Image: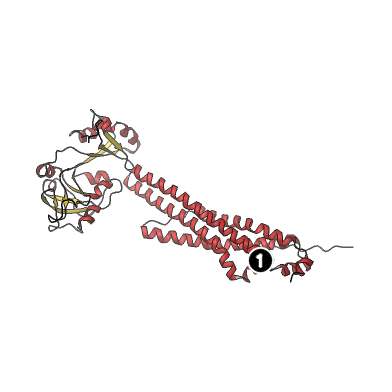
Amino acid sequence: MSTLTPRRLGAGDRLRVGAAGLRTRPMRVFLSSLGIAIGIAAMVAVVGISSSSRADLDAQLDALGTNLLSAQNGTTMMGEQAVLPLSAEAMVGRIAPVTDVSAIGVVPDAKVYRSDKIPAAETKGIAAYAARTDLLETTSTELARGTWLNDSTAQYPAVVLGSAAAERLGVSSPSPEAQILVGERWFTVVGILEPSPLVPEIDSGALIGWPVAQEVLDFDGHPTTLYARAAPDQVESVQAVLGATANPEAPGEVDVAQPSDALEAQQAADQAFTALLLGIGAVALIVGGVGVANTMVISVLERRAEIGLRRSLGATRGQIRSQFLTESLLLSLLGGLAGAAIGGAVTLAYALMQGWAPVVPPWALGGGLGATLVVGCIAGLYPAARAARLSPTEALATP
């Protein structure tokens, strides 16, 4: 006596049978896959925005260079403000690997105002700095409008405003009519700077020439911050001797820093925040997986008659199991694809708003889709096993 051998279902047949179950309940499919989509969209967007920000920062560092060092007057053992020697700039310039040196000096008693009608207490946090004419070249700071100080204008009451200082003072463009009060003298605004990523202190500064600061504002000529460019492969060695060179008598009173470290620290903080957001996205993905599992369990309960009929017509337990597992995978995959598209669109929109080049790592998309398949497989195992355990008579007897 021969026995009937059930026909094996091919991959195409499994997909058609699994998709048929989804097409009959479109609204439930949409709501169930929405949780998966939200989780994947959050993860892809977080990774994409973080990667775009990191790429923009790397481009900035490549353009600005990481070989800029600064030496600032610190504090004495008595807690008072230290003073850099008048010779500090020249001494630092003698360090062999140093290619460029510049400096600024705070003019302590010179307050900056838009007019003489402004109350004395409303300084808007703007500081007056005496600046060397090679400051922009050394610090890679760009000029937005107007001109920078030169050997001629540095001797006259001309001022260049940092980007934040110009905004606070309400000066939109340099002109002979754009006058501001520095100390008790009127200065003509001849230039406005772009934001300076490596030297943010000058963003809120009013920069005047070293000679005119000494002549009319009683500036003592002592620099408060030195900026030095070193050969890229000698940055660490220059950093080690910069303080002692700038102030040999009291090297401990000099604060030496590498301005690019602040940008890299910001990047590290962003990465920590990114990890937190990825965790939130993972939670959303798990919640979406629970929703898929719930949908599949309900689907098994509602389709007992269909299961019984298929079993009566010769479908094996394995074919029933594969049908519901395929449905679960397709349901999750739909959510994953939608989430990846939404996450990519959010990254693109946000990056363009910030002026960044959009970057979505391929591993983020691949990992997101892979995660949806894993979630779909786990969510579908129990409902698929439960459907396969139903006997034909039990299933068909269900009203």
The image quadrant where one finds the C terminus is bottom right
Q: Quadrant of residue 304?
A: bottom right
Nearer to the camera, 220 or 155: 220
- Location of residue 19 in the rendering, given as x and y in whole percent from the top left corner: 64, 67
Q: Is residue 206 above or below residue 290?
A: above
Q: Is residue 255 above or below residue 217?
A: above
Nearer to the camera, 42 or 14: 42
Question: Looking at the picture, which amino acid does disc 1 mark?
Answer: Ser
Q: State the residue position of label 1.
A: 299
Side of 176 relative to 264 (left or right): left
| Label 1 CA crowd tier, 10 Å (few <14, some 14–19, many 20+) | some
- Location of residue 350 in the rendering, given as x and y in whole percent from the top left corner: 40, 59
Q: What is the residue that sits farthest to the right in this orientation?
A: 1
Residue shown at the point (55%, 57%) measured from the top left: 285
Residue shown at the point (69%, 68%) measured from the top left: 303
Q: Is residue 14 above or below residue 121?
A: below
> In this orientation, does residue 340 appear?
yes
Q: Is residue 300 above or below residue 139?
A: below
The image quadrant where one finds the N terminus is bottom right
For numbered disc 1, what is the local secondary structure?
helix
- Location of residue 199 in the rendering, given as x and y in whole percent from the top left corner: 28, 45
- Location of residue 82 in the rendering, given as x and y in whole percent from the top left corner: 22, 34
Q: Quadrant of residue 27?
A: bottom right
Residue shown at the point (26%, 34%) measured from the top left: 254
* Colour theme: secondary structure
Side of 204 relative to 304 (left or right): left
